[in-house]
Structures are given as structure tokens and as C-alpha cells.
């Protein structure tokens, strides 16, 4: 999984096969006047994208909405068949990032 500002690249193939990652928008969206939140690639099903109210978790390289980012990561992991660890079953997920310089 490669994480970027505008998209998340998700792809896992065996070594001999060429790697064709799936690009998933790093955003969530709601249709106007609706309660349901669409996460990542779920927004691809919407034909008129102008009806979506987008929410992006990253701005200028900083995470400004952790809850939104966690929803996107859960969606990406579920596409790979990996259940997101809540910490109650003894498993954990290591997130590695670049330290911010002064």
C-alpha cells in the first residue's frame, strides 16, 4: 500500500506477474442531503461527481482529519481481505511515517 495526498495505491500480486496497483481516492464523500458516507473507491459508483461533498484527510502534507484517514485505511485493508485491528485481539498495525523537521 502506497499512501499519497490524493490517492492510495493498493496492489498485491505474485512476483512473476506485473504489478498493477488499484488507485483509490484518499477521500470520503457524501451525496448532498444523504447520511451515508462513501469511502475511497465507493465514490466511483456515483455518475455525477458534482453531487458529492468531498472530505480529504490530508492538507499540505499534514493529517487534519484522523477519523477520515482511518476510514480510508480500513476500506483499503478490507479490499485486501485484512480486518483492521482494533487492538482487542492482541494484533497491531505498525504505521511508519517521516518525522517532521523543524
Image (cartoon, helix red, strand yellow):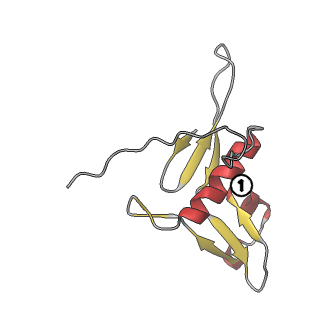
User: In this rendering, is residue 88 above or below 91?
Assistant: below
Residue found at x 59% / y 42%: 9
- For the residue pair 88 and 14, the one nearer the viewer reads as 88
**Residue annotated with mark 1:** 41
Quadrant containing the C terminus is bottom left
- In the image, 64 versus 51, the foreground residue is 64
Q: Going 46% across and 67% down the picture, which residue do you hit?
A: 64
> Residue drawn 63% across and 51% down?
73
Foreground residue among 81 and 42? 81
Identity of the residue furthest to the left in this view: 102
In front of the other: 66 or 24: 66
- Position of 62 compared to 90: left or right? left
Residue density around tag 1, few if under 14, some if 14–19, many if 20 or more, within 10 Å: many
User: Given the current orientation, which residue lies at the most extreme top position?
Assistant: 16
Q: Which quadrant holds the N terminus?
A: top right
- Residue 48 screen position, x and y as percent: 74, 72
Q: From the viewer's perspective, is residue 34 above or below residue 25? A: below
- Measured as percent of width and height from the top left, residue 78 is found at 75, 45
- Residue under the point 69% across and 24% down: 13
Residue 85 at x, y percent in the picture: 68, 45
- Residue 14's image quarter? top right
Residue 31 is left or right of residue 68, and the answer is right
On the rendered structure, is 56 left or right of 85? left
Amino acid at each position: 500500500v502506497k499512501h499519497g495526498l490524493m490517492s492510495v495505491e493498493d496492489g498485491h500480486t505474485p512476483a512473476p506477474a506485473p504489478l498493477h496497483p488499484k488507485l483509490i481516492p484518499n477521500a470520503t464523500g457524501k451525496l448532498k442531503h444523504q447520511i451515508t458516507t462513501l469511502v475511497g473507491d465507493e465514490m466511483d459508483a456515483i455518475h455525477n461527481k458534482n453531487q458529492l461533498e468531498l472530505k480529504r484527510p490530508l492538507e499540505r502534507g499534514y493529517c487534519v482529519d484522523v477519523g477520515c484517514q482511518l476510514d480510508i485505511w480500513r476500506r483499503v485493508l478490507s479490499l485486501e481481505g485484512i480486518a483492521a485491528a482494533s487492538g482487542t485481539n492482541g494484533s497491531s498495525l505498525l504505521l511508519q511515517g517521516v518525522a517532521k523537521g523543524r
